[in-house]
């Protein structure tokens, strides 16, 4: 990205047009905000400004291939809006909630949402684990570069409805993470993780995504342990009408 132009570079123009369509101008405005305010406010690194389109916007927008029409989306650890804000720009049919605990980031997100006129986006300043039960269960929960898959599943799966999905953007480590964390994902109610590739026909570097379906509800560990303790306490009490043991 050079000079005063924040439009997609020539070698990515066709892909950007195919993905964003008539909302390409809106995506370009967001690219400008990322490359200027986003850098100044420490939301992305200075070197990332030159790779806004390939590394960030198109990489994230390609995820839309896996999301059905009119879906509700919760984006965990949204940061500068990646991928949630990008999806909201590319897909006005989606209802997107950006979950981010840091004030300086939610301030940026709220400003961009207002300036771009994105009426399909809500910004929630909250940690993912504290949002469970507060936000409506989503069809899709997204995350990018937030945490390893085991922790990500523990945070994200409870925010999805049963039958909903977590879509985690991952890079070259995707297969290794799936192998390492398969059992941990199952323990928190997730199905078998599946690696998907998005934008293969459009992008020089397709987007790698790990998809996990929320197959069942799992009670938090504190609730389980509390129930066990209560049960143990009940079993330890003498039954009504029974004699106390002789000393």
Image (spheres, grey):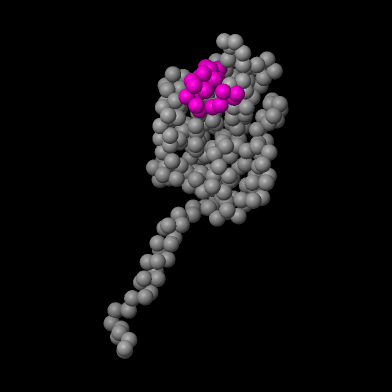
In the image, farthest residue toward the left: 241
Instruction: Indicate left or right for 75 with 57 as reference.
Output: left
Q: Nearer the viewer, residue 169 or 67?
A: 169
**Residue in the picture at 41% in, 38% down:** 126
How far across and how far down the image is residue 72, in percent?
49, 35
- Image quarter of residue 167: top right
Q: Nearer the viewer, residue 12 or 199?
A: 12
**Residue in the picture at 57% in, 37% down:** 145
How far across and how far down the image is residue 75, in percent?
50, 35
The answer to whether 130 is drawn above or below residue 105 in the figure is: below
Instruction: State the predominant SS element of the stretch in magenta.
Output: helix
**Residue in the picture at 60% in, 55% down:** 183
- Image quarter of residue 232: bottom left
Q: Which residues are magenta?
A: 28-48
Quadrant for the C terminus, please. Answer: bottom left
**Does residue 39 show up magenta in the picture?**
yes
């Amino acid at each position: 990205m050079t000079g005063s132009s924040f439009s997609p570079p020539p070698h990515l123009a066709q892909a950007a047009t195919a993905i964003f369509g008539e909302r390409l101008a809106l995506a370009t405005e967001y690219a400008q905000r990322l490359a200027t305010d986003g850098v100044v406010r420490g939301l992305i690194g200075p070197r990332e400004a030159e790779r806004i389109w390939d590394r960030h916007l198109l990489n994230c927008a390609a995820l839309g291939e896996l999301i059905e029409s009119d879906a509700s989306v919760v984006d965990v650890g949204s940061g500068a809006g990646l991928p949630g804000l990008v999806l909201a720009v590319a897909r006005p049919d989606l209802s997107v909630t950006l979950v981010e605990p840091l004030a300086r980031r939610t301030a940026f997100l709220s400003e961009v949402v207002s300036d771009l006129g994105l009426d399909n986006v809500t910004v929630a300043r909250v940690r993912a684990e504290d949002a469970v039960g507060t936000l409506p269960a989503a069809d899709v929960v997204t995350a990018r570069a937030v945490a390893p898959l085991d922790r990500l599943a523990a945070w994200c799966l409870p925010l999805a409805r049963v039958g909903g999905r977590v879509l985690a953007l991952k890079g070259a480590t995707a297969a290794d993470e799936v192998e390492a964390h398969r059992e941990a994902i199952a323990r928190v109610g997730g199905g078998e993780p599946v690696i998907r590739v998005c934008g293969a026909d459009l992008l020089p570097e397709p987007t790698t995504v790990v998809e996990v379906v929320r197959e069942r509800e799992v009670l938090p560990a504190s609730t389980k342990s509390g129930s066990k303790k209560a049960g143990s306490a009940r079993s330890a009490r003498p039954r009504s009408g029974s004699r106390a043991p002789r000393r």
